[in-house]
Image (cartoon, grey):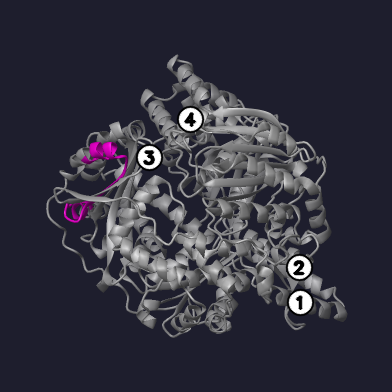
């Protein structure tokens, strides 16, 4: 559970199947073609070679160095991956829950010795082609990674990050601590005192989510005697106890090369890596730090913990129950980790997995929770349980889990289950598909799981021999998984059962406790101290809102426009046909894997059935077919493919009121298994049995639980979707399928399933009939040419089973409500998510120009960052412009404000009108936009992107035109865009906020005209 400096939830996870990291970052690279830094040069630079290994699984030459003067350790991974990665990782074990590692992680990025401006991190965001730029805090470490495919950019990122981490200005400037951590805010002597701070509000958002509360309680209950027993992210009630002196001392204690592990990965010069570090290390001498992560002594008997979470006023009396274990005294060896990863997948990896199925079939809860195996910390853990459990049934969950484990230990797993698990995990290992997450960073985090604890950093990267040995043991009849269940779970007394109960008064209690604490502070102040607090608030805001001098900003290294390719990169695509189906093929190196998408038109689905579509899609892979049960189908998918999914895709298309609307069947398989892939796709589309009422009810309950959790933790997404639904058909359809409208539909559907199952079954069948038409179908393939030829022939199996002709399109637009309104969607939360939007095409008559990409990116990195995040204290403030629909949206994330955030949104126009951009600032803004346009992609993502461009009518010629417009953006374009953005504060603009009832009431008292809807 890691906290990130920027955006999102900050959590770092891995796919359940990817228990180990994966293979072939640079397919085809041989050991003989890789060379480390010259050992004599390394020695001259002060580095000794500790160990060197060629890692076959990653086609990489890895050298571990130790720097003599500081003791710093460096892993240099050399391969042909152009997406170069650097990271420095420090052990930072906290002693309390004041959030000191988390606040420091934010703060060091706010100015340094070499870059003495307010936020060099933000300047990098403005001007870099980075493929990754962030930082995150684990319970026992802090990571500062960067990645880029551009060599000079890569070196720039390293230089800024090294200076930021080890020479930050925040230890001298208390204002940074106040901004990122916490401070008292008092704007006038008549107002109440409040707490402000980015991390403070971030963690209030975290602790508003019951799932997060459960996760933290589980960890702290399992580890009461070591550093994992406190929250490194910070507990809101405790964060204000942290002093600036403690903050400074923590940095001086732990932030030193002697307490660091440095990581390089990719195709850059390995000798230059050492030169960079040797030059940086000149200012340091060895400083041994006692940062060792002590282990938690294992319990001699199980424990039970009961706690509460803040429930909404309309919430049912339902809670959470999980059973949790610490699995061993120390880290697992690789083979045990691999074996337990397989066991984790066998028990919980699919909805047909026996432990998952036993929990859901019990009817005790609405969704499985607990996380399963977690093995990134010093001691691995396992947790599982249910949420949405009636309070009187909570005690039954532990017995259910133990009974299911006992049954699996005795009966074992079928040959088909084991084969499916092996194929799924081995496919994932070899594919090494980390999506947009750099492969080098994924590998770094894996290596750290050993390296951080003084263990072999190479071992986690070498999984092939252990996998082969595990398969041999299984083939020999050894009861590998039964032994693991008995040893680590059934016979393991280090077990904690957590019951988390709903409390509808808790949110009010927490709010009152904070007010009482602040009132006590205020009451204890003399008039002079009160005046001083007002002055301190004023000075901090002045500091936050005063921009750095333009000349000072030039200290941050940046690329020039000459470094940017003028030509837009093209993705290879060949168009063809297979009967009435359009075929797109992308000849790209994928290591023998074929990635396939089949798009079927969903235009014939009636408007009233759109909310049911996502569940219909789930049924296709989770209900079973005429020939196979749900369990058999799941095993077949696991044995034969790398996975298959079905989901709706709906998007606006610029210049058209009719949206692009497809059901997407996506799958991947080795070339020789594409026949199996398309055979499965045919079976699930044409022969799925929808008549399992209990199974469908489980899906409904899971969906409801997931959406109710998401609206509390990611309210900005719901707010943005709600606004989009008022302006475009595509937006309205997406709201029906995944927004608040869908949640309301799902709640009513639960009753229908119980009381009128026949009508639900008829609706599912009607959707199937509407979809299974060949007209408008598209087949998209990505792989090498020979593999795609095999796949194209196999695809006929699926396509020939579809009814001929094109479906008759439904009139979805007529179902859209004519009234548009601003809303507050209330939930139990301590923070808000505030969105405001307008449609620039409809409301301002805007015609798309590439400068819009530059300007919207710039606004998110300057005005909105400074006013909503830095001054306002929100965790995030940004904007987005959807060039397909014309929707321009302002969004905030974990925001303590509502009305003032809307005021800041409205003031964006004035900011643009008065903007003065010198050549350096303009160049950086352009480069940042190009960085988004040229985002690094793996081959499968390139093929899918090309497919999306085809669907949305974006030609290579238009892409080149937009690129030229981006590169030629002027300061005058910024000022002209202000006229366009008037629409976003004009009469057509609307606000939707996910907020607490109190915040909604206060916002309306301050002049916002929000229709209040109670959601939870």
Earlier residue among tags 2 and 4: 4
Please report contact status of discs 3 and 4: CB closer than 8 Å, yes or no: no
Neighbour tally class for label 1: few under 14, some 14-19, many 20 plus, Cα within 10 Å:
few
Neighbour tally class for label 3: few under 14, some 14-19, many 20 plus, Cα within 10 Å:
some
Using the image, tell me which numbered label, if any, was put on residue 539: 1
Instruction: Please give the name of the residue rendered at 14% of the width and 51% of the height, measured from the top-left corner.
Output: 580
Earlier residue among tags 1 and 4: 4
Please report contact status of discs 1 and 2: CB closer than 8 Å, yes or no: yes
- Which residue is the site of mark 3? 590
Neighbour tally class for label 4: few under 14, some 14-19, many 20 plus, Cα within 10 Å:
some
x%, y% of residue 815? 27, 71
Earlier residue among tags 3 and 4: 4
Compared to residue 123, the image places residue 664 above or below, namely: above
The residues tagged by marks 2 and 4 sit, at their Cα atoms, a distance apart of 52 Å
The residues tagged by marks 3 and 4 sit, at their Cα atoms, a distance apart of 17 Å
The residues tagged by marks 1 and 2 sit, at their Cα atoms, a distance apart of 9 Å
Q: Residue 786: in sight, yes or no?
A: yes
- Which residue is the site of mark 4? 30
Q: Which residues are magenta?
A: 768-792
Query: Any magenta on residue 770?
Result: yes
- Which residue is the site of mark 2? 175
x%, y% of residue 128? 56, 60
Please report contact status of discs 1 and 3: CB closer than 8 Å, yes or no: no
The residues tagged by marks 2 and 3 sit, at their Cα atoms, a distance apart of 50 Å
Label 3 SS: loop
Earlier residue among tags 1 and 2: 2
x%, y% of residue 102? 69, 54
Which label sits in the foreground, 2 or 4? Answer: 4
């Amino acid at each position: 559970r890691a906290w990130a400096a920027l955006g999102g939830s900050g959590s770092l996870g891995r796919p359940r199947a990817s228990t180990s990291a994966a293979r072939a970052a640079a397919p085809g690279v041989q050991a003989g073609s890789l060379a480390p830094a010259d050992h004599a040069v390394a020695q001259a630079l002060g580095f000794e070679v500790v160990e060197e290994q060629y890692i076959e699984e990653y086609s990489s030459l890895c050298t571990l160095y130790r720097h003599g003067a500081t003791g710093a350790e460096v892993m240099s991974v050399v391969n042909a991956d152009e997406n170069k990665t650097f990271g420095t990782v420090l052990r930072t074990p906290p002693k309390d829950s004041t959030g000191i590692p988390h606040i420091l992680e934010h703060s060091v990025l706010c100015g340094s010795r070499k870059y003495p401006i307010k936020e060099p991190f933000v300047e990098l965001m403005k001007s870099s082609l980075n493929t990754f730029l962030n930082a995150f805090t684990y319970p026992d470490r802090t990571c500062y990674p960067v990645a880029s495919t551009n060599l000079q950019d890569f070196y720039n990122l390293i230089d800024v990050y090294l200076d930021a981490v080890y020479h930050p200005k925040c230890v001298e400037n208390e204002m940074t601590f106040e901004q990122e951590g916490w401070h008292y805010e008092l704007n006038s002597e008549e107002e109440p005192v409040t707490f402000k701070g980015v991390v403070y509000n971030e963690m209030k958002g975290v602790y508003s989510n019951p799932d997060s509360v459960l996760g933290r309680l589980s960890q702290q209950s399992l580890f009461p005697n070591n550093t994992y027993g406190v929250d490194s992210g910070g507990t809101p009630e405790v964060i204000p106890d942290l002093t600036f002196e403690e903050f400074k001392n923590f940095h001086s204690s732990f932030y030193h090369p002697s307490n660091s592990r440095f990581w390089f990965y990719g195709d850059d010069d390995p000798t230059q890596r050492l030169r960079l570090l040797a030059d940086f290390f000149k200012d340091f001498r060895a400083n041994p730090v006692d940062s060792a992560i002590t282990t938690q002594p294992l319990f001699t008997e199980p424990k039970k913990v009961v706690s509460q979470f803040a429930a909404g006023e309309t919430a049912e009396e339902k809670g959470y129950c999980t059973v949790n274990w610490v699995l061993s005294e120390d880290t697992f060896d690789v083979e045990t980790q691999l074996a337990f990863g397989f066991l984790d997948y066998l028990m919980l990896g699919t909805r047909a997995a026996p432990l998952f199925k036993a929990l859901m079939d019990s009817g005790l809860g609405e969704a499985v929770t607990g996380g399963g195996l977690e093995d990134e910390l010093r001691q691995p853990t396992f947790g599982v349980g249910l949420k949405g459990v009636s309070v009187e049934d909570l005690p039954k969950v532990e017995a259910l889990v133990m009974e299911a484990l006992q049954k699996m230990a005795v009966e074992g797993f079928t040959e088909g289950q084991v084969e499916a698990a092996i194929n799924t995990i081995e496919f994932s290992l070899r594919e090494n598909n980390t999506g947009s997450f750099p492969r080098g960073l994924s590998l770094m985090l894996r290596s750290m799981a050993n390296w951080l604890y003084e263990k072999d950093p190479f071992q986690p990267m070498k999984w092939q021999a252990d996998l082969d040995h595990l398969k041999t043991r299984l083939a020999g009849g050894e009861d590998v998984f039964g032994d693991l269940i008995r040893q680590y779970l059934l016979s393991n007394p280090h077990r904690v059962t957590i019951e988390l109960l709903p409390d509808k008064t808790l949110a009010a209690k927490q709010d009152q406790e904070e007010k009482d604490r602040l009132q006590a502070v205020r009451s204890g102040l003399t008039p002079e101290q009160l005046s001083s607090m007002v002055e301190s608030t004023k000075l901090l805001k002045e500091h936050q809102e005063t921009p750095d001098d333009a000349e000072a900003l030039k200290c941050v290294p940046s690329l020039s426009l000459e470094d940017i390719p003028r030509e837009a990169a093209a993705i290879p695509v060949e168009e063809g046909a297979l009967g009435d189906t359009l075929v797109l093929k992308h000849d790209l190196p994928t290591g023998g894997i074929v990635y396939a998408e089949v798009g079927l038109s969903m235009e014939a689905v009636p408007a009233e059935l759109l909310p049911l579509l996502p569940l219909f899609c789930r049924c296709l892979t989770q209900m079973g077919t005429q020939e196979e049960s749900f369990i058999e189908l799941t095993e077949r998918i696991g044995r034969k493919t790398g996975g298959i999914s079905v989901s709706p895709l709906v998007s606006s298309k610029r210049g058209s009121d009719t949206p692009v609307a497809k059901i997407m069947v996506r799958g991947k398989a080795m070339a020789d298994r594409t026949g199996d892939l398309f055979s499965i796709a045919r079976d699930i589309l044409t022969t799925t049995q929808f008549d399992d009422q209990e199974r469908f009810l489980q899906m409904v309950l899971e969906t409801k639980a997931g959406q109710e959790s998401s609206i509390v933790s990611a309210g900005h997404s719901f707010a943005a979707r709600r606004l989009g639904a008022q302006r475009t058909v595509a937006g309205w359809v997406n709201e029906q399928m995944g927004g608040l409208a869908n949640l309301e539909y799902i709640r009513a559907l639960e009753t229908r399933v119980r009381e009128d199952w026949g009508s639900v079954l008829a609706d599912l069948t009607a959707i199937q009939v509407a979809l299974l038409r060949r007209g408008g179908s598209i087949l998209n393939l990505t792989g090498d040419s020979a593999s795609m030829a095999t796949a194209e022939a196999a695809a006929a199996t699926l396509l020939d089973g579809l009814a001929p002709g094109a479906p008759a399109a439904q009139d979805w637009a007529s179902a859209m409500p004519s009234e548009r309104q601003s809303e507050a969607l209330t939930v139990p939360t301590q923070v808000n998510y505030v969105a405001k939007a307008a449609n620039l095409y409809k409301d301002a008559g805007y015609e798309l120009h590439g400068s819009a990409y530059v300007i919207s990116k710039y606004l998110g990195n300057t005005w909105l960052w400074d006013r909503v995040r830095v001054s306002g204290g929100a965790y995030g403030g940004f904007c987005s412009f959807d060039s397909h629909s014309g929707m321009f949206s302002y969004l905030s994330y974990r925001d303590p404000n509502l009305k003032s955030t809307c005021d800041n949104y409205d003031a964006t126009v004035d900011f643009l009108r008065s903007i003065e951009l010198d050549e350096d600032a303009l160049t950086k803004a352009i480069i940042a936009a190009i960085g988004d346009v040229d985002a690094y992609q793996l081959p499968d993502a390139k093929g899918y992107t090309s497919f999306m461009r085809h669907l949305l009518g974006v030609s290579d010629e238009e892409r080149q035109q937009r690129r030229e417009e981006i590169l030629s953006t002027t300061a005058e374009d910024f000022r002209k865009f202000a006229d366009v953005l008037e629409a976003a504060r004009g009469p057509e603009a609307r606000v939707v906020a996910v907020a607490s009832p109190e915040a909604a009431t206060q916002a309306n008292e301050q002049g916002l005209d929000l229709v209040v809807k109670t959601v939870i």
